[in-house]
Image (cartoon, grey):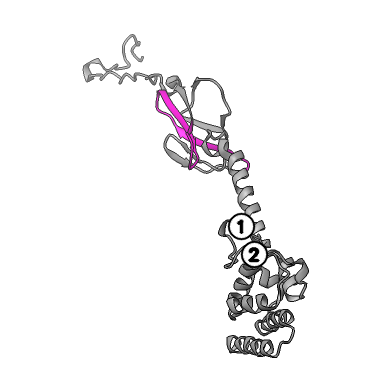
Amino acid sequence: MEQSRARSLLTANQMNNENETAPVRAVSETIADAMRIKGINAEKLAQVTGISERFVALIVGDHTEKLPAAPYLHGYLVRIGEALGIDGEELWREFLARETDIPRSGANDRLPGNAKKIIFGRSAIIGSVAVLAILLYVTFRLPWFFGKPDLKLSFDEATLTIATSTFVVQGSADTDGALSVNGEDVYPNPDGTFSKTLTLAPGFNTVTVRVKRLLGAPNEIVRQVFFNDETASSTPASTTRTTAPEEITPDEAPTGTENSEPIQ
C-alpha cells in the first residue's frame, strides 16, 4: 500500500513536469511525502541509506545550491528511492531535466564505488568501542589466562617430622583454579584459604598440592612429611608369679602332742 502511494506521488510529479511546474521542488516534495508515508524522518533515512543526514536534509529542504556534484547526488537519489519504494532513477531524470547548475562529470554521472563515504551510525560506534574494550581487556589479562595461579602453604620446610598420624595441610590458593591435595578435590574459602586433613603412614609421606586454571600451566607444591612412630611402640606388661601352697600329707601333719608333758 505504501509503495503504491509513493508511486502515485511520482506519477503526479511527472504530470507536473508536463505542466512545467517547479521540478526540483516537486522532487523534494515527492521524497518528503514518501517519508511521511513510511513514517521516517531524515535521521532514520540517513541511517537506512548510508547518506549523511546533512545531505538528506538538503535534498528534502530543496537547498540545491549546497548539494554535492552530480555523480554523488545521482547515487543519493537512487538509494533514497530504494529506501522509500519509489523509482530513484526517475527522480534523478526529473531532477536533471530542470536543474542545470549542479556540476557534472559525464553523461552517466554514476557515483564512483570507491568514493562512497561510510557513515557510521550510533550503533556502529558503540560496537566499535565495545570491540576495542574487549581487545584491551584480553591483552591486559593474557598473563592471568596463561600464567600460573597463586598457591602458598602455611609451612615452607621441604620435610617435616611429626609424631602424630594426622596432618592438616593449610594454605591459600587462587579461587579461580581447581585445587587438589594428593589428587582429592579441595574447595577453598571465598578468601582463598583452605585446609585438608591427611592420615599418615609411619615413615615418609608425600604431600602434593596442585591448583590449575582452565588455561595455562598448573602450580604444584610437593612436600615430605615424616611420621615418627615411636609413640606407637608399647612396653611389655609386668607379670606376678603366684606359687600354690604345698600339699601336706597326713603323716606330716602335726599332732599337737610333741614336747608336751603328760597330764597328771
Residue name at image x 64 percent, y 64 percent: 72
User: In which image quadrant can residue 101 be found?
Assistant: bottom right
Residue 178 percent coordinates (x, y): 49, 41
Q: Given the image, on which type of amino acid does mark 2 rest? A: Tyr
Q: Which amino acid does label 1 sit on?
A: Ala
Q: What's the mark number on residue 46?
A: none
Asked which secondary structure carries label 1, the reply is helix
Q: Residue at x 30, y 21 (%)?
A: 244
Q: Quadrant of residue 70?
A: bottom right
Q: Where is residue 61 in the image (x, y as percent from the top left)?
A: 77, 75
Query: Can you identify the residue that label 2 sits on?
Result: 72
Residues at circles 2 and 1 in contact by the CB criterion of under 8 Å: yes
* Quadrant hosting residue 154: top right
Local crowd size for mark 2, using a 10 Å CA cut-off: few (<14), some (14–19), many (≥20): some
Residue nearest the viewer, comparing 242 with 208? 208
Q: Residue at x 71, y 87 (%)?
A: 20
Tell me the residue that label 1 is attached to: 115
Span of residues in magenta: 191-219
Position of residue 80 measured from the top left corner of the image (x, y, whole percent): 63, 74
Foreground residue among 17 and 121: 17
* Residue 218 among magenta residues: yes
First-in-chain label (2 vs 1): 2
Q: Identify the main secondary structure in magenta.
A: strand
